[in-house]
Image (cartoon, coloured by chain):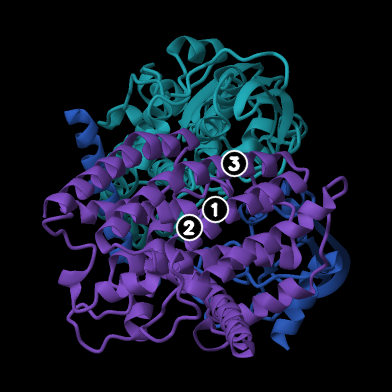
Chain colours: A purple, B blue, C cyan
Amino acid sequence: MSLTILNVLAAVVAAIAFAALNAAYLVWAERRGAGRIQRRPGPNVNGPFGLLQPPCDGIKLMTKQLMIPGGADKALFMVAPVLTMIPAIASFVTIPFSNTIVAHSMNVGVLMVIGFASLGGMAILFAGWGSRNKYSVMASVRSVSQAISYEVPLFITALTVVLITGTLNLHEMASIQAGGFWNWNITPSLSSPLMPVSFLIFFICILAETNRAPFDLGEAESELVAGFHTEYGSMGFGLFFMAEYAHIVIGTSLITILFLGGWGCPFGLYPGVWWFLIKIYFLIFSFILIRWTFPRTTIYGLLNLSWKVLIPITLFNLLLTAGLLKVF
Amino acid sequence: MGAYFNDIFSGLWSLCIGLSITFREFFKPVVTVPYPYKTIKMCKRYRGHIELIENEEGKPKCISCGMCQRACPSGCISLASKSVAYEVEVKGEMKTKKKKVLTKYNLDFTTCSLCGLCVTSCNFDAITFSQEYNLVSTRKEDFHFDLLNRLQERNS
Amino acid sequence: MSGPIQIQPDETFILNIGPQHPATHGVLRIKMEMDGEYIVKAETVLGYIHRMHELMGENRTYPQVLPNLSRLDYLGAMGYTHCHVLAIERAAGIEVPERAEYIRVITVELNRIASHLFWFGAFVMDLGGFTPLMYAIQDREYILDALEGITGSRLTYCYHSFGGVANDIDDDFIKATRAIIPMMRKSLKKYEALVTGNIIFRKRLEGIGPISAEMCRKYGATGAVARGSGIDFDVRKNEPYSVYSDFDFDVPVYHECDSLARYMVRMDEMEQSLRIIEQGLDKLPDGPIMPAKKPKLIKPPVGDYYQAVETARGSFGIRLVSDGTKNAYRFKLRSPTYSNMSLFDEACEGMLLMDALAMLGSLDLVIPEIDR
């Protein structure tokens, strides 16, 4: 019993460390990447290649005063940044980084991660409502409607994968795909011919779910100043910022496990945690590239895309896969 | 139905084109200059603040006619002069003549709009633009230049 | 999609955009009565950067006003000083050598491209895409460098002077400009692939912010706003000034009336400006850049003069009433963006906030020019 508690504690500490480190250095990677895309160097003064920039930013954020705007709902205002961070860290518990590195392999892993992801929407709603700012309220309402409409195709696509693999356990799901890229879920097979489309839809949904550009309507800096975190400064803002990147890591991990074979090598050689990391960082790079390429969508464009394009296709795909699985 | 799928595919294709452009830019060299570590040379017509030009004797060429002062739209030039008597030999006989000598030439750079009207209005080519652009301060007084003083410092 | 809808009069709230807001690109304030995300009523509030340029024009001598003109629109300053010198040359009857006029046209067109490039970047940034701004600024940098080489300034030029231009252009400038033309053509292709063809971008602009030709006439909108609404009006063609009648160029006109039409007009205008520069460099005559007898004291005879030019933002005009002294009696500036902006209040009613701000960006506002 005590060993289990220790295990859980160690897992939580490791998850927090991983999430924080990733968040800090993904900010750096994003700024460097954006710089390269825009033909400028990005942060390069603090330390070699600007590698000391994240700690500097962290110190700056932590030493600033935490301001609560007058008339704000204090409880909601304070709880929102924490609430956005909790699901991000909790989700790490069930993510299998390799065959052996997994904190707790759960039989409802997929459900848990997606369930926790939905909690993020609540944090945004709290933040927007609690700050007593019209921009924030509008942004949070946008974010929530966005989250609701994108969880539907996200879930249906995950369900398709669950149908194929026959399990909700993330660890088992990745193990089934071991052996090479022809075993991965993304490769179309006789029983699941539309899997690349599913992958694309899942990718788009993760983009929308993590509030990344071109779906960053909750932040929309040219319209709503800074969206739901307009009134946040200091570490309140820092937590939102870190949670965004933690969510990205979770999202890309989910894509990797569901579609790209988890820790498996594309050619079946040396499977291990490094392949997992290579895959998620490749996906994160594509997130960065997308963010710095496209303009923002509109709220109705986004809802149209979800309800008129993604959901019909995913539903069709689900039915097709179910039917074909029955046949073959 | 055809238009529906056509829209999706052409849309996706346009997004891919966009991504390919930014991806190619990713590997191109940076075009910026890391400013405090590396500076660029200003072109020779660069308009900095004005500077007095000296003659062969190291004295300012300015004869303090005040054209620049009158031409300036923002009134940021103020100059003063005094008459100095000097003797010249004209046809073998010493004559006393009077000449205006510049005693003060102040530029209030805070109100200068760098239009260059003072330089074009000067008939004696006595003022020019400096190439200096590293001008920063938190105090107004730092931008009240005494150009006569600067000229002497340059010479010494 | 976001056409005018029927809105219940109750349950609205006031949203104050500006004077400091990322979308207004300056100190413009818009008071919006909102119903959720829909705008019920909008009211633009001006005057935050009013500097009394017209009064200054009446209190200063004619040459002293020249630097003021480039402070109106800091992105396309060349066109504004051009208008001032043309107005006073017309009033005072100063002859301008042909070479000087050609140099003026080349610099004005270069500045127009620089201004449109910056607008392009800022507009895409309004829509949430940041990278095109950096590419646009990179291209604009070459133009600014070329202009800096001959004028000495980068933004607020004071290069045109009465009777000609301040300095003659040199070989470096001609070489740089010749290099800019193919580079810009390549860049315009890149922008077309990266931005114009982008489905997200098109969906955000197609049919958004319709401004009818009638509304343009009502508010006196000119420039790309009018040309995007099907009004074929360009001062360079309709009332040719300077040496524009020597050049062969088209005026792009779109009839869609939406934000995309206004965007396309400006993108096409850049290509036309390149054509003008190319022809200008080919035809550039030799000769002086100032008349033999430099006008010293400018005292236009008593009278009422008007000069309009096509700046990057539309038709800019100076009305000058002279009483024969060295100061103007009345110095009225007709600013294009003031008219272009005034139709925003009416046009944005019933629109979504994000569409309205996309439309605001497509009007290409420079706030110091509105407030003067």
> Left of C87 or right of it: where is C241?
left
For mark 3, give the secondary structure: loop
Q: In the image, what residue occupies the spot 39% across and 22% down?
A: C227
Residue tagged 3: A223
For mark 1, give the secondary structure: helix
Q: Do labels 3 and 2 share a chain?
A: yes
x, y (%) of residue A184? 22, 68
The chain letter under disc 1 is A
Mark 3: give few (<14), some (14-19) or many (20+) Cα within 10 Å. many
Residue tagged 1: A118
Q: Locate residue C317: give its quadrant.
A: top right
x, y (%) of residue B120? 61, 53
Q: In the image, what residue occupies the spot 65% across and 54% down?
A: A123
In the rendered image, the quadrant that contains the C terminus of chain C is top right
Give the CA distance from mark 3 to mark 2: 29 Å
Q: Is residue C16 above or below residue A77?
A: above
Mark 2: give few (<14), some (14-19) or many (20+) Cα within 10 Å. many
Q: Is residue A6 visible in this depiction of the protein?
A: yes
Amino acid identity at mark 3: Glu
- Dot 2 and dot 1 residues touching (CB under 8 Å): yes
Amino acid identity at mark 2: Ile
Q: In the image, what residue occupies the spot 32% across and 43% down?
A: C198
Amino acid identity at mark 1: Ser
Residue tagged 2: A114
> Left of B124 or right of it: where is B42?
left
Q: In the image, what residue occupies the spot 35% across and 63% down?
A: C172
Give the CA distance from mark 2 to mark 1: 6 Å
Judged by depth in the image, the label closer to the viewer, 3 or 2, is 2
